[in-house]
Image (cartoon, coloured by chain):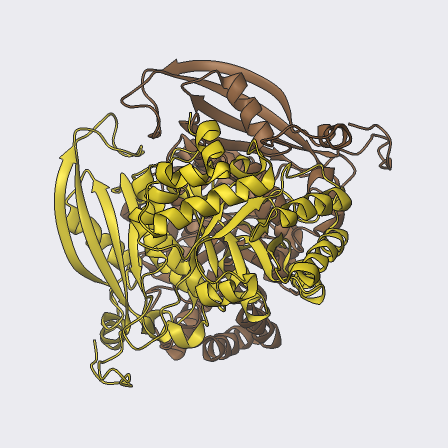
Chain colours: A brown, B yellow
Amino acid sequence: MTKSGSILSSGKAPNTRLRARYWLETPADPRKVAETIAGEQSTGTFVRLAPEVEARAARCDAVVESVQEVEGAPHASLPTARRAGDVPVRRALIELSWSEENFGCSLPNLMATVAGNLFELRDVTGLRLLTLNLPDGYAARYPGPQFGVTGTRRLAGVRAGPLVGTIIKPSVGLSPEQTAAMVATLCEGGIDFIKDDELQADGPHCPFEARVHAVMRVVNDHAARTGKKPMVAFNITDDLDAMRRHHDTVLAHEGTCVMVSVNSIGLAGLAYLRRHCALPIHAHRNGWGYLSRHPALGFDYAAWQVLWRLAGADHMHVNGLRNKFSEPDESVIASARALAEPLFSEGLPGYAAMPVFSSGQWAGQAADTYRALGSDDLIYTCGGGIVAHPGGIAAGVESVRAAWQAAARGQAVQEAAVGNAALRQALDFFGK
Amino acid sequence: MTKSGSILSSGKAPNTRLRARYWLETPADPRKVAETIAGEQSTGTFVRLAPEVEARAARCDAVVESVQEVEGAPHASLPTARRAGDVPVRRALIELSWSEENFGCSLPNLMATVAGNLFELRDVTGLRLLTLNLPDGYAARYPGPQFGVTGTRRLAGVRAGPLVGTIIKPSVGLSPEQTAAMVATLCEGGIDFIKDDELQADGPHCPFEARVHAVMRVVNDHAARTGKKPMVAFNITDDLDAMRRHHDTVLAHEGTCVMVSVNSIGLAGLAYLRRHCALPIHAHRNGWGYLSRHPALGFDYAAWQVLWRLAGADHMHVNGLRNKFSEPDESVIASARALAEPLFSEGLPGYAAMPVFSSGQWAGQAADTYRALGSDDLIYTCGGGIVAHPGGIAAGVESVRAAWQAAARGQAVQEAAVGNAALRQALDFFGK
């Protein structure tokens, strides 16, 4: 690794290496397997090379930076064809690094390097990508989030506290007019943020153009009357030409946010959208379960979210405390914290994204979420927690907002509820 | 499901439903969980709906077509937050269906429907998408593979037998000139097909433009001299603007194939490329392990490949018999067979893609591959099996071709080797 090259304003040499940490499980020697992976993912070959080729290739070797063995197990996590029956396995935390010169600053090619033909290696019975550290060169090639927390707050007109939001349900089955009617009720209720469901993009029952037209008339009217314009995240997920067209439709109707299912459009798709986008990008992670649900395979969110922030996501879903899915609370908080970690060396932009909490959320999780995160720079979307509030939608919104205000001033939610009927009702109704 | 609508030439009503089969594991009642999934992925909501909304939404309900319970297990495959400790689980094959009217004919939105927020449901301790059947409407929106077997054979000038191919190694570390020198040797050796490695796209050591220029000069010279033009799959994986530019570069230099890492560019990325592409698309599946390696999670290849054929893949990787990875042989063959299954109803194009066998391949697997597949409409890429052949590259190519010719005429490879020194050498050297 050369020490020459451009020097950042901080006076430090730029980071020119890509670093990836993995949890590895193998019936073999973890160090040898780490070296196999490093070879497979850089200069490995099946023949002896000519000396001049050898010399050049050696500069491109991936490096095994560290192998820290941890406690093993009597059985392999993933099946393997070679070994019949169960075998004891060893486990280790390994770190590999690559020079950015191997692949240039290209997100799709980075992906093939750190998460390519690794997970199916014979001697691998478990492999999970834990963290990713990017070379600083990526900051020049990818602009990252365009709006982040500050831009989102400005567009939504919410200076402090979380954006209190909800989701249009049923996700399919509403016409554009029915959707707009629901949005009108939500606006009246004082909501900050509304999102399409990931199942509704441009279906025949609710065509995109007609929906945006109907919904934004309601939103713009409400803004003209009250001065408050809720942010609506329209689901533009589609083929890329359609996605650009949908984006332009939202912009033309003075909408303030677009949403995409990132696993459906892919990394290159999001990077493409970002370059043509004038609105915050709300990144929905549906499908995350198939990438993460087995602890011995796939991705930790800490590594995965780096890719999407780099590609341009402004808002990223992180699930919520006491959610309806299988994810434990500490994992949710770790995900939200990861979104604030700087992607590059000191002196370069951090590319922070805004966490989106959802799934089974209501006023009841505000205090714990705030305490764990130490911040309310987030979007907090409640479904039933707002629209099924016994006092109606306005009371639902009020209950969530009051709970977050109490959390921010360190007041117990039960105490805050003494002077707030909507919050009291929420605690009685949802807190059972 | 309506029986009206356009009638195909076959006289049958078109298929307007999307069908997905899953393997499901749950500590609960599999039928109830299937219904939960159907609700989550269509019209589920948290409140009572107005009657007119209810009526419309009912038409969009996903349908549980069947639940076939199979043998359960004493322990859950995937961890779940709710239940402490191990619980016995039930397992079932379930089939769900959706009307295409729910989401229109859009590949990214189909993805969010069949592989969205499902895998992390609390009552799911295992979920794997086994098969996908598409509504016929997708055939009008997506053109599918542009070249397939016939177009590939024509461009490569290979009328019968597999395209015998190899990979440029080391994947990183060669300059454009060194790459071209290796290609020259391979052309002299009689190769049909050469591919870039998935780690080499447009790295600073081997810039794309310069590599194409150097390699295609060699290939075009060889074609002018001999009348045979090997197909080179150049790895154009990158951000989409760069990908289009790379494609145009290959075309301008009279190249005949482009390669992409499909998990890096995403479904929308491949569909975008297909619409602007004039060359066969060689689809590399690196990363497939994180989508498939645990049998209780993710995708079977039979379901996954449908998405990429629809998006436009002409060639798709399927691994190889006795490969260096963990995949069993029967899985490899099932994958290759799946690529030939028609995607739509009778009377519509089938969208077949050409299987690419690779990983540890040499002459030795030809007979078993042919016997299992009943076809040699495939690309057969050998690394060491060709370039490390003790008689040199020409002998390596000859040994592979001879083995396939023997397989096609039903002759044992040992017998064929009696009159073929290259094959004899391969059996002696690689067959240990």
| Residue B332 in sight | no
B229 horizontally vs A263: left or right: right
Q: Could you say where residue A335 lies in the image, as x and y percent from the top left?
A: 50, 38
Q: Is residue B118 above or below residue A91?
A: below
Q: Could you say where residue A46 lies in the image, as x and y percent from the top left?
A: 58, 31
Residue pictured at 61% horizontal, 46% vertical: B189
Residue pictured at 53% horizontal, 56% vertical: B282
Count of marks placed on residues: 0
A251 horizontally vs B398: left or right: right
B31 and B252: which is toward the camera: B252
A154 and B306: which is toward the camera: B306
Residue pictured at 27% horizontal, 78% vertical: B14
| Residue B353 in sight | yes
Q: Could you say where residue A32 lies in the image, as x and y percent from the top left?
A: 53, 18
A37 horizontally vs B17: left or right: right
Q: Is residue B211 above or below residue A259?
A: above
Q: Quadrant of the C terminus of chain A?
A: top left
Q: Is residue A419 above or below residue A26?
A: below
A195 and A418: which is toward the camera: A195
Q: Could you say where residue A109 lies in the image, as x and y percent from the top left?
A: 62, 46
Q: Quadrant of residue B45?
A: bottom left
Residue lying furthest front: B419
Residue pictured at 25% horizontal, 58% vertical: B38
Q: Quadrant of the N terminus of chain A?
A: top right
A348 horizontally vs A315: left or right: right
Q: Is residue A180 above or below residue A149?
A: below
